[in-house]
Image (cartoon, helix red, strand yellow):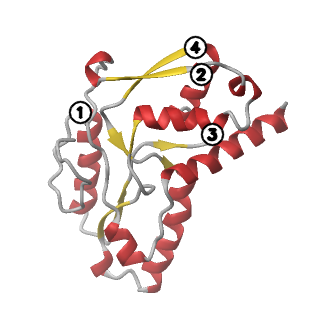
Amino acid sequence: DGNKPGPYTEKDAPNPQSVYGRTKLAGEQAIRAAEGKYLILRTSWVYGVHGGNFVKTVLRLAKERGELRIVADQFGAPTWARLLANTTVPILQHWQAKEIDENLCGVYHLTAAGRTSWHQYAEEIVRLARQHDAVLANKALTIHPIATREYPLPASRPANSVLATDKVKQVFGINLPQWQDDLAECLKELYSASSTKA
């Protein structure tokens, strides 16, 4: 529910506050109820080169406006879709090498390392984008931190979405990069792709 002060572990009792969260939990429960061998990988704040996401929205708004107002009291770990793909493969390979060991079944948290607010995330997106984007590099832009109550949405968002990733590291030997490092790589790729099209 976002009320825990520190990162959520896999042992914390889920308490989703929105329809989106409740349907995700229902999916997990359905997988468990099937009584097969399974791995559930939970993640958060996913972005990527393709599709719509927070990174692309911030980049678009940063070019269109002189000021942005971004929520500063919700925290999570931005996670590149590529990180999920690149870590899911070795996790499955490890699991298969152990002949789908039932002892390895269960829920694992899989996000980039670190913690940030939406506001700090937006600032980092723009800072990194200025290295690739001449329009942003020469533009004055102010990113104001605001409280959740100043940006009401139809569905409530948790104040804390940070997931502890100790279990996936210990069990599968996965080293997770800091969210800023993956964001930098994603933006390089995003601008490289856009310059190729131009």
Question: Which of these two is toward me, 85 or 62?
Answer: 62
Q: Secondary structure at mark 1?
A: loop
- Distance between mark 4 and mark 2 Cα atoms: 7 Å
Q: Nearer the viewer, residue 66 or 187?
A: 66
Q: Are marks 1 and 4 in contact (CB under 8 Å)?
A: no
Q: Nearer the viewer, mark 1 or mark 4?
A: 4
What is the C-alpha distance between the residues marked 1 and 2? Answer: 29 Å
Residue contact between numbered discs 1 and 3, judged by CB atoms under 8 Å: no
Q: Taking the image as drawn, is residue 83 in sight?
A: yes
Q: Nearer the viewer, mark 4 or mark 2?
A: 4
Q: Which mark is residue 128?
A: 3
- N-terminal of the pair, mark 3 or mark 2, is 2
Residue at mark 4: 66
Residue type pointed to by label 3: Leu
Label 3 neighbourhood size at 10 Å, few (<14), some (14-19), many (20+)?
A: some
Asked if residue 80 is positioned above or below residue 123 in the image, the reply reads below
Distance of mark 3 from mark 4, alpha carbons? 17 Å
Q: Residue at x 40, y 48 (%)?
A: 77
Label 1, label 3: how far apart the Cα atoms are: 32 Å
